[in-house]
Amino acid sequence: SSLEPASARPPPSALLGRRPGAMFNARKKILKDKGAAPTELEEEVAKALFDIEVSPSSDIKGDLRDIYISSAQELEVKNRLALVVHVPFRVWKTVRKIQGRLIRELEKKFSKKHVVFVANRTILDKNFRRKGLQVRPRSRTLTSVHESIMEDVVGPTEIFGKRTRIGVDGSKLLKVILDPKDKDKENVEAKLATFSAVYKKLTNKEAVFQFPEV
């Protein structure tokens, strides 16, 4: 987009895959707020993305040129680590286009980790008028942002339906039903606990992810 800062775009040399400057070029795959220093994990993710981008055999390299990350974190889920990668909202459309293949490629590089991509979204609270806005877009409400995060977390699998179960003590548990056609794809069933843990970490809300019972 025209609003994209020059620093966000990889230099032409990055596309040639020259090894001496590879780490420097990989740094172009990270855009931190106000120049904050990236963590070691973020540098690893950026380098992995850059390696895929310059790989002659990669069929997603064209799209990857436009993708960069804003942060990355690890989360422990049932004796395994999940890698949560956050990207600026303006590149999310490109990530969605190649999400399945990108996750597959990164999981090869970060073996034994489940990779999850999430877009950065801004929640506007009820004081939005102080920020000079007349109307709060629905997409910026807490509920809407949390719904979008849920869709990001399970991607590229799609949400088939949702049910809220109310316990005898009045507690609510959200059951998220995933598209049954994806049940045998990409090891998705093994990731159901990861989806719950990542969603809880990002929203502080409990949800159980499952496929429809036959």
Image (cartoon, helix red, strand yellow):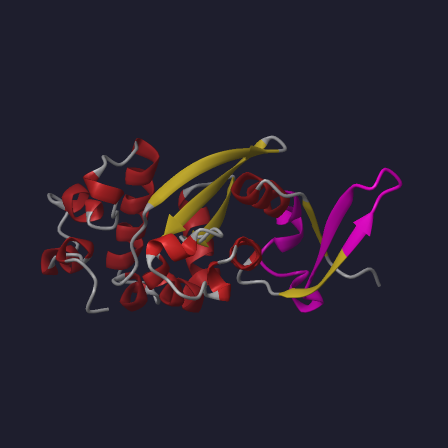
Q: Is residue 185 magenta?
A: yes
Residue 132 on the magenta segment: no
Pick the front one: 112 or 5 = 5
Q: Position of residue 28 (x, y in %)?
A: 19, 50
Residue 188 in the image: state x and y as whole percent. 62, 54
Residue 112 position within the rendered picture, expressed as x and y whole percent measured from the top left? 51, 39
User: For this rendering, which residue is in front, 187 or 88?
Assistant: 88
Residue 200 seen: yes
Residue at horizontal 33 percent and vertical 59 percent from the top:
132
Magenta residue span: 164-193
The N terminus sits in image quarter: bottom left
Number of numbered discs present?
A: 0
Q: Is residue 15 left or right of residue 116?
A: left
Give the image location of residue 87, x and y in percent. 36, 53
Asked if one can make out residue 121 in the rendered structure from this viewpoint, the answer is no
Q: Residue at x 31, y 63 (%)?
A: 57
- In the image, taking residue 76 as reference, residue 30 lies left or right, namely left
In depth, the one of 130 and 17 nearer the eye is: 130
11 to the left or right of 168? left
Q: In terms of image quadrants, where is residue 14?
A: bottom left
Q: Residue at 30% of width from left, 33% of height from top?
A: 39
Residue for point 19% across, 69% down: 2
